[in-house]
Amino acid sequence: MPTYKGKYRVRNYRKYKGDPTNVVYRSLWERKFMDYCDSTRNVLEWSSEEHVIPYKDPVSKKWRRYFPDFYMKVKETNGKIQSYLVEVKPKRQVDGPTPQKKHTKRYITEVMTYATNKAKWEAAEEYCRDRLWEFKIITERELKV
């Protein structure tokens, strides 16, 4: 049975920016993305949950801190070097809940989670814009799971 959470053992530690002994994955998708970053030559450097972005949570109306899943610096095919912040999420959470006539407890929770995620992602996009980086959300479709 696969482990869905655990510590990732960085193989190419020179590429990792942060503490390579404390890299934690919270899903198999995150672990797969870590393998990609660690083994792909065009990924010049990467880190996991090392950046902190403040955002206003629309549900609690409080300021909170968002730790995007990954940072990576990539040498593109055209030779250009580009930095990215990457969030790994299930497609259903990226698309948001489908409107329903009956507002069940589950539906309301999904709506609130989606609103919080949108606030995080907007803050991340602004953070990236200030640094000339790009913010990307990766789903199981991009990971080909």
Image: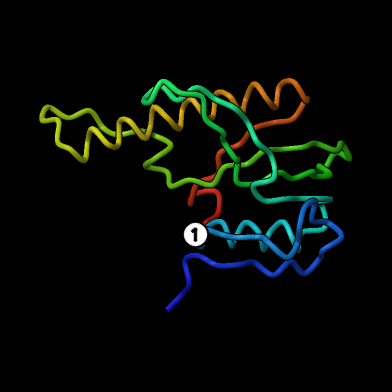
Residue 101: % across, % down: 12, 27
Relative to 7, is 69 above or below? above
Relative to 1, is 139 above or below? above
Instruction: Give the residue at x 64% y 66%.
Output: 8
Instruction: Give the residue at x 61% y 36%.
Output: 136
Residue 23: % across, % down: 66, 60
* Residue 123 quadrant: top right
Quadrant for the N terminus, please.
bottom left
* Residue 97 quadrant: top left
Query: Does 139 sit left or right of 46 as displayed?
Result: left
Residue 50: % across, % down: 69, 45
* Residue 25 quadrant: bottom right
Instruction: Give the residue at x 61% y 67%.
Output: 7
Q: From this viewpoint, which residue is outermost toward the front?
A: 62
Residue 102: % across, % down: 10, 30
Query: Does 101 sit left or right of 32 as displayed?
Result: left
Instruction: Give the residue at x 54% y 47%.
Output: 88
Query: Does 88 sit left or right of 109 as displayed?
Result: right
Q: Who is closer to the viewer here, 81 or 54?
A: 54
Q: Secondary structure at mark 1?
A: loop
Identity of the amino acid at label 1? Answer: Ser
Q: Who is closer to the viewer here, 116 or 73?
A: 116
Q: From this viewpoint, which residue is outermost toward the bottom?
A: 1
Specify few, some or many for label 1: CA neighbours under 10 Å numbering under 14, 14-19, or 20 or more: some
Which residue in the protein does label 1 denote? 27
Q: Who is closer to the viewer here, 118 or 90?
A: 118
